[in-house]
Image (tube, rainbow, N blue to C red):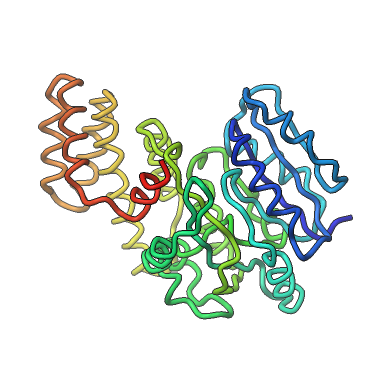
Amino acid sequence: MPNVSICIPTYNRANYLVYSVNSVLNQTYNDFELIICDDGSTDNTAEVVSQWNDSRIRYIRHPKNIGRSKNMRSGFDAAQGTYFIKFDDDDALTPEFLERTVAVLDAEPTVDFVCTNHWVINQKGDRMESATQENAAKWGKDKLKEGIIPDLMRQTFEYQSLQVGSTLFRRACLEDVDYMRPEADGCEDFDLLVRLAIAGKQGYFLPEYLMEYRFHGGQTSLKQNLHFLKAKVFCINSYQFPDEELEAVRIKKLAWTQEALGLRLIENGDTVKGRQMLRESVEVLGSSRKTQLGLILSYLPLSLRQLALQAFRQLRPKDYTEQVREAAG
């Protein structure tokens, strides 16, 4: 039985998968199994996987697309290791990731998972120093010190400072919270970490940069954003925090997410639902220029509202994620 199970869910990214798999095979710690879960890819993923003649690799190919969360769940259900990690098919681990994180879990029996810091890389696999530092600051990783993570509910929910792809878990703690919820599809990583915190699990932060997270042009679209925002509304609605201050944060975060979802729905042509989301957000946040604009645009023909919203989006300063995507294009 392997000590660690590594799961890489994949779908039509054979070109990136090679980089991801090789990052696992190059680990300095070797007691692992690698489970590649293929969600019905129509590219040459199966051919690419066949190039590796390594008994530690298991390939699960679904005949048709079953969705992100179910695909991820299939890898988790097949896992045999005491420890478990899942990361995406366009990301990678540094060679020392398993060696360093396994050592923490072996030495700290009360710790349920250990999260590391990570590099931002572009489409070509280049590490982006400036974007990496901006990412760490944006999510508060630069303020976390090595050791047990204090106030885990706030770190996972309010600050969202942890990332599943750079985290090694005890598989037992994931079984306790039923790992991935299908209703959270698209937002499952955020949801998993929050539910672990609510369940009283204990996390450990290792500030070393032991994982590579890739930004590239194929990651963003209106359809993907809609899917993510709908899932996030579901997730935030499902939580309840014992701390009154954090519960107030949850209500506001739900309203902000409803506002973002409402604008996207209006842009996509789902006018009635979009207006409903905006009005629900106004009940908590009050009226803003953004909600007023969205409601006004909802009465315009679809083509005009899409042009207007896209134009306003272009006026917004590009953040580091967009700059990395464009630089790699």
Q: Residue at x 30, y 43 (%)?
A: 258
Query: Is residue 100 or residue 329 the one in the foreground?
Result: 329
In the image, 323: left or right of 116? left
Q: Residue 299, image x and y in percent?
A: 12, 24
Residue 90 higher or lower than 242, as above or below:
above
| Residue occupying the point 51% across, 80% down | 145
Q: Quadrant of the N terminus?
A: bottom right
Q: Quadrant of residue 68?
A: top right
- Quadrant in which residue 11 is drawn: top right
Snapshot quadrant of residue 225: top left
Image position, residue 96 (x, y; %): 69, 67
Residue 127's spot in the image, x, y percent?
Answer: 50, 59
Q: Which residue does the image show at 54% across and 75% down from the upper left?
A: 149
Question: Which quadrant is home to the C terminus?
Answer: top left
Relative to 236, 59 lies left or right: right
Image coordinates of residue 73 in percent, x first then y, are: 67, 41
| Point 70% across, 75% down: residue | 104
| Horizontal arrangement in the rendering, residue 171 relative to residue 117 (left or right) | right
Q: Is residue 143 left or right of residue 181?
A: left
